[in-house]
Amino acid sequence: MYNKVVIIPTYKEKENIENIIRVVFQLPEPFDILIIDDNSPDGTADIVKNLIKDFPERLNIIERSGKLGLGTAYITGFKWSIEHGYDYIFEMDADFSHPPEDLINLYNACHNDGFDMAIGSRYISGVNVVNWPMGRIMMSYYGSMYVRIVTRMKIMDTTAGFVCYTRKVLEAIDLDKIKMKGYGFQIEMKFTAWKKKFKIKEVPIIFTDRKQGTSKMSGGIFGEAVWGVLKMKIASWFKKY
């Protein structure tokens, strides 16, 4: 076991899962992996369980009963990671939209540069998104701008799902009180860490849309983020951080 773990939530990722696991394990910096699978009907979990024979100390899986939301998948993973003593806990997608080699840059920002949290950011140095339709880029970019206006956070990529948390950040956040389940979860985690005065660094990445499998994005997730951010901001006036 190493002191850093990459949490990868999966639902129907059979085309990507073995490749992403092998690529992460081949990086020059060692990472463990925790897969959180939401009962994928395509056999994603079976592929992972077969690979555990090759990587018994480094690859782990938690299987859940169904699609219970991105936020709850990560919270399950965060709690497991804290219980297992990891110091650096990462979020990453299974579909190669987040470049696995950039895990090292996120880790260095926390371990070497002293930040509490590092975000793989699509927007910190222009718009670094490949293969997305223009409408989706605009929705994401202006969505992040909306979040900045409402919350006053200085984070350019507020919905980023490629993040390194140090253990102390996750221990300081009451994970059971994180309300949002979809992409709003990413905003709520960043907002809570920011309100608690943790040092946050955005590390530029190039985000490339998936080539295999299907996207899990939906209009309901976007709606949750819009209204959830307003509710979250209002609730923050009555909270102590």
Image (cartoon, rainbow, N blue to C red):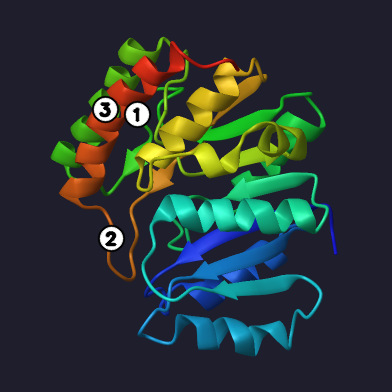
Q: Is residue 97 visible?
A: no
**Alpha carbon of mark 1 to alpha carbon of mark 2: how far?**
20 Å
- On the rendered structure, is 26 left or right of 128? right
- On the rendered structure, is 48 left or right of 111? left
Q: What residue type is labelled 1?
A: Val
Q: Which amino acid does label 3 sit on?
A: Gly
Q: Residue 212: percent from the left, percent from the top? A: 34, 70
Camera-nearest residue between 18 and 177: 177
- On the rendered structure, is 152 left or right of 139? right
Q: Give me the residue at 69% from left, 59% from top.
A: 80
Camera-nearest residue between 71 and 95: 71
Q: Give me the residue at 45% from left, 72% from top.
A: 16
**Alpha carbon of mark 3 to alpha carbon of mark 2: how far?**
18 Å
Marker disc for residue 143: 3
Q: Residue 127: percent from the left, percent from the top? A: 34, 29
Q: How many marks?
A: 3
Q: What residue type is labelled 2?
A: Ser
Q: Residues within 10 Å of mark 2 (few under 14, many from 20)?
A: few
State which tag comes first along the sequence, 3 or 2: 3
Q: Give me the residue at 19% from left, 48% from top.
A: 220
Q: How crowded is mark 3: few (under 14 residues within 10 Å), some or many (20 or more)?
A: some
- The residue beneath circle 1 is 127
- The residue beneath circle 2 is 215
Q: Is mark 1 on a helix, strand or loop?
A: loop
The answer to whether the residue labelled 3 contacts the one labelled 1, judged by CB atoms less than 8 Å apart, is no
Q: What element carries label 3?
A: helix
Q: Is mark 2 on a helix, strand or loop?
A: loop
Q: Going by the picture, which residue comes out furthest to the front?
A: 238
Q: On the rendered image, what quadrant is the C terminus found in?
A: top right
Q: Is residue 209 visible?
A: yes
Mark 1 vs mark 2: in front:
2
